[in-house]
Image (tube, rainbow, N blue to C red):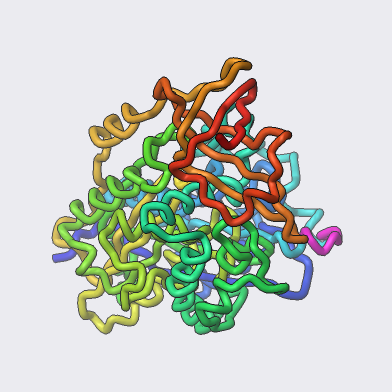
């Protein structure tokens, strides 16, 4: 018999807005109403509302504002700290509470309206009751790890935006594979092209257009080089208006409400982090945190990645997909595909909320199994492939019920691998060997920056931007991994040897 406390997903909602100007709370309300239209008997039973951190100016109480718009009175509201891992982390956290008998029905929502912000028009229709209001009970409690994703070393080298950090990881992967950046782009085009076919078939995708490998990998006026080795069409697209929501409950509640046939079962979840700051990671081209979280989630479910019918690996930048494939032992060209949505460059990258769409889509796909066993695996990340949350879902219940894997021992091992990072180098300088390098381009194709990570001769790691005397144009197209450089100053700067 199925455990009455088995956590399940019973409703999903995904919406976008391409024309009008909307606020994040308004769009999340639409997504939540789609959920509730499928399970109307659960509206009055919602005890808990969680909102994924919103980047589009949703104020300090988006969960409270959402509950108000939905005309519900949950016992608890909350919002998360920054992190694209937050949707899966929330599912696992709420599944714990449902399984333990502390919670019956919960709603998770997330969304962004960067397109509306870019229109530079006020969201006048939402000013009276949106999430910017400061009256009422005060800000929503913030849950999840709220540490910043960068430290003084990253700050000194200008490594703040994901588009600046992830190319460093890609340089390591290209070097390991023995590929030039041009060769690496060609490989990435072949890996990413099947994702566009998935996006083309998804009702909520921002770019429902199927593209060839060459369309993605070849630089052009419409597809400029952003960095080595990424073109524009390889990078997450944030300028979307998208929102999603899911409703979770216990299997017993679903049965009592007459919606047991809608249940998608949460089997297991696990969380882990890589060495927190990218500059201190021993190997910037791999993710032991994801490897640990993935192995733990699959182990808790007593399943293998080969048992998965569906996969969705986080895909803000190609290196994240490559590291996920390495962590799970999956071929980047696996016939199952690497996404159920189309991924952040093609489905859309709504801030921290993308994985909520992947969870919703995976649940919708598993619900059509006709009673046969089908399972799906989802990985999600926060910051610069820093925080990892993995979930396993299935069309049928697990004999063990819900399992939350403990990764504490493995996390200690990862944390102990942190390298010592030098924040200043004597004016006389020190030799170093490059571990990761990035070349960034402006819209005119001119090199705008070339930061790197390197190991000093004394064994310390350093993050450095190019010295002012370096002619950046000479670095175009070069992967400096393995090369010798000379590091000086505070913050550190480098000169090629």
**Total count of labels:** 0
Q: Nearer the viewer, residue 334 or 376?
A: 334
User: Which residue appears at 74% of the width and 55% of the height?
Assistant: 446
Q: Position of residue 425 (x, y in %)?
A: 57, 19
User: Which residue appears at 39% of the width and 39% of the height?
Assistant: 274
Q: In the image, which residues are magenta?
A: 117-123
Q: Position of residue 420 (x, y in %)?
A: 43, 23
Is 184 on the left or on the right of 223, as rendered?
left
Is 470 on the left or on the right of 105, as rendered?
right
- Any magenta on residue 120? yes
Is 275 on the left or on the right of 84, as rendered?
left
Is 68 on the left or on the right of 10, as rendered?
right
Magenta segment main secondary structure: loop
Q: Is residue 119 visible in the rendered structure shown here?
A: yes
Q: Is residue 62 above or below residue 276?
A: below
Q: Is residue 388 above or below residue 350?
A: above
Image quadrant holding the C terminus, namely top right
Q: Is residue 75 visible in the rendered structure shown here?
A: no
User: Which residue appears at 15% of the width and 58% of the height?
Assistant: 302
- Any magenta on residue 134? no
Q: Nearer the viewer, residue 7 or 309?
A: 309
User: Which residue appears at 52% of the width and 50% of the height?
Assistant: 479
Q: Nearer the viewer, residue 146 or 459?
A: 459
Q: Position of residue 123 (x, y in %)?
A: 81, 60
Image quadrant holding the N terminus, namely bottom left
Splitting the image into 4 quarters, where does residue 335 fall? bottom left
Q: Is residue 323 above or below residue 465?
A: below
Q: Position of residue 133 (x, y in %)?
A: 75, 45
């Amino acid at each position: 018999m199925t455990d009455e406390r088995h956590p399940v997903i019973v409703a999903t909602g995904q919406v976008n807005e391409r024309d009008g100007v909307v606020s994040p709370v308004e769009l999340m309300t639409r997504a939540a109403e789609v959920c509730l239209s499928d399970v109307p008997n659960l509206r009055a039973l919602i005890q808990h509302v969680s909102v994924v951190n919103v980047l589009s100016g949703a104020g300090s109480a988006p969960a409270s504002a959402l509950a108000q718009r939905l005309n519900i009175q949950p016992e608890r509201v909350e919002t998360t700290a920054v992190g694209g891992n937050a949707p899966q982390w929330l599912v696992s956290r709420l599944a714990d509470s449902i399984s333990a008998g502390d919670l019956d029905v919960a709603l998770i929502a997330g969304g962004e309206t960067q397109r509306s912000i870019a229109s530079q028009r006020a969201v006048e229709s939402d000013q009276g009751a949106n999430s910017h209001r400061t009256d009422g009970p005060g800000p929503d409690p913030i849950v999840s790890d709220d540490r910043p994703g960068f430290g003084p070393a990253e700050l000194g080298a200008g490594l703040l935006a994901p588009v600046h950090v992830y190319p460093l990881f890609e340089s390591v992967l290209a070097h390991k594979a023995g590929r030039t950046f041009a060769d690496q782009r060609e490989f990435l085009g072949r890996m990413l092209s099947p994702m566009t076919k998935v996006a083309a078939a998804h009702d909520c995708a921002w770019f429902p257009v199927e593209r060839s490998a060459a369309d993605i990998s070849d630089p052009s006026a419409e597809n400029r080089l952003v960095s080595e080795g990424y073109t524009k069409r390889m990078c997450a697209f944030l300028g979307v208006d998208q929102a999603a929501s899911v409703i979770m409950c216990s299997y017993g509640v679903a049965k009592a409400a007459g919606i047991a046939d809608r249940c998608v079962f949460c089997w297991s979840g696990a969380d882990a982090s890589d060495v927190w700051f990218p500059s201190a990671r021993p190997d910037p081209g791999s993710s032991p945190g994801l490897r640990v979280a993935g192995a733990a989630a699959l182990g808790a479910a007593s399943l293998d990645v080969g048992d998965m019918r569906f996969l969705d690996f986080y895909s803000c930048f190609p290196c994240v997909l490559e590291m996920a494939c390495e962590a799970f032992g999956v071929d980047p060209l696996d016939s199952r595909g690497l996404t159920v949505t189309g991924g952040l460059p093609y489905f859309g990258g709504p801030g921290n909320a993308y994985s909520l769409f992947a969870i919703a889509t995976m649940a919708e796909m598993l619900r059509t199994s006709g009673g046969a066993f089908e399972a799906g695996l989802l990985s999600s990340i926060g910051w610069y492939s820093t925080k990892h949350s993995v979930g396993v879902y299935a069309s049928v219940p697990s004999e063990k019920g819900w399992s939350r894997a403990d990764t504490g021992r493995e996390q200690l091992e990862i944390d102990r691998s942190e390298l010592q990072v030098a924040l200043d180098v004597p004016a006389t300088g020190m030799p170093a060997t490059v571990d990761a390098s990035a070349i960034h381009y402006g819209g005119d194709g001119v090199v705008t920056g070339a930061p790197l990570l390197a190991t000093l001769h004394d064994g310390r790691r350093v993050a450095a931007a190019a010295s002012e005397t370096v002619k950046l144009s000479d670095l175009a197209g070069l992967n400096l991994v393995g090369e010798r450089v000379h590091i000086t100053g505070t913050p550190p700067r480098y000169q090629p040897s």
